[in-house]
Image: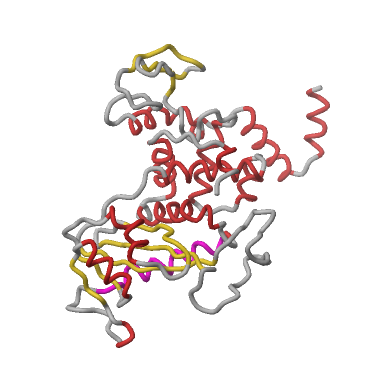
Amino acid sequence: MWLDMYEQFSDLTKDEQIKLFFAMKEDLFPDSTTNISNKIVDIREKRFSNGLSCVHCGSMSVKRNGTYKARQRYLCKDCGKSFNDITGSPLSGTKYPYKWLKYIQMMIDGCSLRTIAKELKIHLSTAFYWRHKVLFSLQSLGHKKLFGIIESDETYFLESEKGKKKITHRKPRERGGVASKRGISKEQICVVVAYDRNGQIFSEVAGKGRITALEIDAVLGDYLDGASLLCTDTATNYKKFAAMKGLRHEAINARNKEYVRQKIYHVQHVNSYHRRLKDWMERFNGVATKYLNSYLIWHRFLELNKKFNSKENMNEMLLNACKKANFTTVIDIRNFN
């Protein structure tokens, strides 16, 4: 058998021989640097940085409970459930543990799902669900509070029902299409973005069309420090929001060519962020509205870590995705609205 294989191997061109060699090496002898088992200690330290606790109920009353497939298992004395270091993470139950680091690396590099599926030899739908498992885990971490001078403004994305078989409230659009109405309407999804001078970022879907002060408060209100100063444009909704929260407020009137006040108050950082966000989103040829918050979190992660190299970003995304237990399943993602 081996002689027959060798004869066929010899018939290949040099390039084909090299490709076959590396394909066999990856399948039969995966590189130890791509093996997720080398990251288990880091995941454990990140996940249980405040002490070993049950990923199901949060109890600190936990004991070791043997090993399974070389992984330490734990038993919760309160709820009686067992778990290991990656239970409730995107890696839980994976059939291809050695492909995950390369997957996250390609995700960081902005590769398309088709490119990832072809490179890693996984199904396209698997590549899609892996992406959303990571994004749902990152989204579950929430946002951090913003302090000091905080710039805030809205940006808009066309509502998208991408992937939905039947659309009842409007006619389907081809390849995203355009809105039927000019300007801001209910066809536009409003995203509130806030950016403080420490580089911390907030971005989240707030509603459709023009939003009110109450809608701004519903998404942003809990993430602003009470002693902060809010910089916005002259929109009435932000004036009302600042008054509701008791925040100091500087309204910049760009229509009167006022872009900076007292050499410090402006909304240039947040407007620049809007441009970078829109440019980055274009690669996906439209994101379904139901997944928009996940992609906002993804872009926020890349922005907050853009000073680091690709390998460091891969490690950080992996650890953050595993930090908090999140039991989102493929069925949950499929049925997510």
Q: Residue 41's image quarter?
A: top left
Is residue 285 positioned above or below 8 on the image? below
Q: Measuring 39% from the left and 40% from the top, which residue is drawn there?
A: 320
**In the image, 211: left or right of 152?**
right
Q: Residue 129's image quarter?
A: top right
Q: Measuring 56% from the left and 61% from the top, which residue is drawn there?
A: 283
**In the image, 192: left or right of 267?**
right
**In the image, 191: left or right of 257?**
right
Is residue 159 positioned above or below 83 on the image? below
Q: Measuring 37% from the left and 28% from the top, which residue is drawn there?
A: 44
Instruction: Give the colouring mode of the picture.
Output: secondary structure
Identify which residue, 190 or 144, lies in the foreground. 190
Q: Main secondary structure of the magenta part?
A: helix
Identify which residue, 105 or 171, lies in the foreground. 171
Give yes or no for residue 245 being in the magenta stretch: no
Counting the numbered discs, the total is: 0
Residue 39 coordinates in the image, percent (x, y): 42, 31
Residue segment shown in magenta: 266-283
Is residue 241 positioned above or below 146 on the image? below
Q: Residue 218's image quarter?
A: bottom left
Give yes or no for residue 280 being in the magenta stretch: yes
Is residue 100 positioned above or below 293 on the image? above
Q: Quadrant of the N terminus?
A: top right
Identify which residue, 52 or 140, lies in the foreground. 140
Residue 190 coordinates in the image, percent (x, y): 45, 65
Residue located farthest toward the top when viewing the structure as drawn: 66
Identify which residue, 216 or 252, lies in the foreground. 216
Q: Measuring 27% from the left and 69% from the top, which residue is drawn there?
A: 240
Residue 83 coordinates in the image, percent (x, y): 44, 21
